[in-house]
Image (tube, rainbow, N blue to C red):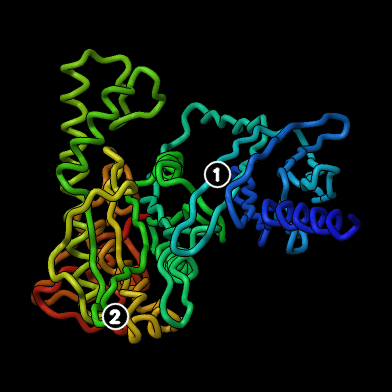
Amino acid sequence: MRIWLATILLLCTCFATAETVKLTDFRVWTAPERTRLVFDLSKTIQHKIFSLPSPNRLVIDLQKTHLKKKVPTVGRNEQLIKKIRHGVRKNHGLRVVLDLSQKVKVQSFLLKPNKQYGHRLVVDIRPTTKVKPVKVVAKTGTIKRSKDIIVAIDAGHGGEDPGAIGKKGTQEKKVTLAIAKKLKQLIDRERGMKAVLVREGDYFIELRERMSIARQKSADLFISIHADAFRKSSVHGSSVYILSQKGASSEAAKWLAERENSADLVGGVKLSKKDDMLAKILMDLSQTATNEISRDVAKKVLKGLKVVGKVHKPQVQHARFQVLKSPDIPSLLVETAFITNKSDERKLNSTRHQLKIAKAVFSGVKSYFYQNPPMGTVMADIRKHTVTSGDTLGSIANQYDVRIASIRRVNRLKGDRILVGKRLLIPTGS
């Protein structure tokens, strides 16, 4: 009888163990707008999330879950979470408690396995209130200054999304951020230009949110940096993409359909205040101009990449990438190399090669905007002078009332020797 009971108890224990979900990893990603928690699980689970006040806490209950790894500590940049605690519940469940600095909004969802990860529970927390920006009112009689050209640089993937992974373990998200930071440094050094990083660290941002960030920053150009992948490791080289016509049409339809509920602008005009026909005309005009600029910038960037190394596609490509769908911000996506190629992966890990890619992209962007500066920008104030017989840097500087050193700097001249027929950029106010 005792042996029979022991056998039943052993079987029950085995069944209970079999039903237990293993929490194999627990990660926290801190982004400017939110904090994301990712629970890596052996299989899908049922969970419950609720908040507690005084002090503010967030409780996450995972049914029949066994913790296999230590709970992560809170990073220095984390603003919402003070501390993470955990405990085992009576019903073999796991309770995770977040001690918070303020009230938060919570969103959670389950993800199915993919190539990199198994089952996951994702919990996003955001502050309930946003800090209102201080409104600066210009004084009467103040001279309106020309603005810098703003370039939004989007490092692909991030956080729990590593992107493509090379055979040596190189992660696309790390390479793209490294190149994006180098590109920002180059742009920020150029007079009349300024760069903003869409993603400044190792965290994930939704694709549409990346577009929104660029719009919030009043970007004149959006560049998304990626590293390609393919099943054949022999494929290598870089490519440049802009939005396809089908992608543009589908996005136009979406904006027109949602314009009543959208606070976004197209070309500085609210679609919600226009009738259907006028809204469609405004959308078409905005998209046509945007697509033309995207194509012209992409051509110049591709030309620069050809100097760095082999390009996979010799012409600008068209695709329906989500991040390229802003109807009012010229956008391009640069596939810097194939991370699945042995040689390309090695180059992508080289800081020297990363800088070469950044310089190639910068060269194309700078070349376009010097030739086509937007109205009201510093670059629009920079003039051009074609050198004729008898011209010297001194005489040209006197003619335009600028310093010789300034002409040398914007034209990257090492000395005073200039050739007849050469077109010099002449800055203003310098």
Number of the front mark, 2 or 1? 1
Can you tell which mark lies on residue 261?
none
The quarter holding residue 53 reads top right
User: How far is mark 2 from mark 1, CA to CA?
Assistant: 33 Å
The answer to whether residue 170 is above or below residue 9 is below
Left or right of 27, for residue 191: left
Looking at the picture, how far across and down is residue 334, in whole percent? 30, 63
The residue at the point 10 percent across, 77 percent down is 420
Amino acid of disc 2: Ser
Which quarter of the figure is the N terminus placed in? bottom right
Residue assigned mark 1 = 110
Which quarter of the figure is the C terminus placed in? bottom left
Left or right of 391, for residue 133: right
The quarter holding residue 328 reads top left
Does residue 379 appear in the picture of this structure?
Answer: yes
Amino acid of disc 1: Leu
Number of marks: 2
The residue at the point 48 percent across, 55 percent down is 113
Looking at the picture, how far across and down is residue 39, in whole percent? 64, 53
313 or 430, which is in the foreground? Answer: 313
Left or right of 100, for residue 235: left
69 or 265, which is in the foreground? Answer: 69
The answer to whether residue 84 is above or below residue 135 is below
Can you tell which mark lies on residue 233?
2
The residue at the point 36 percent across, 64 percent down is 226
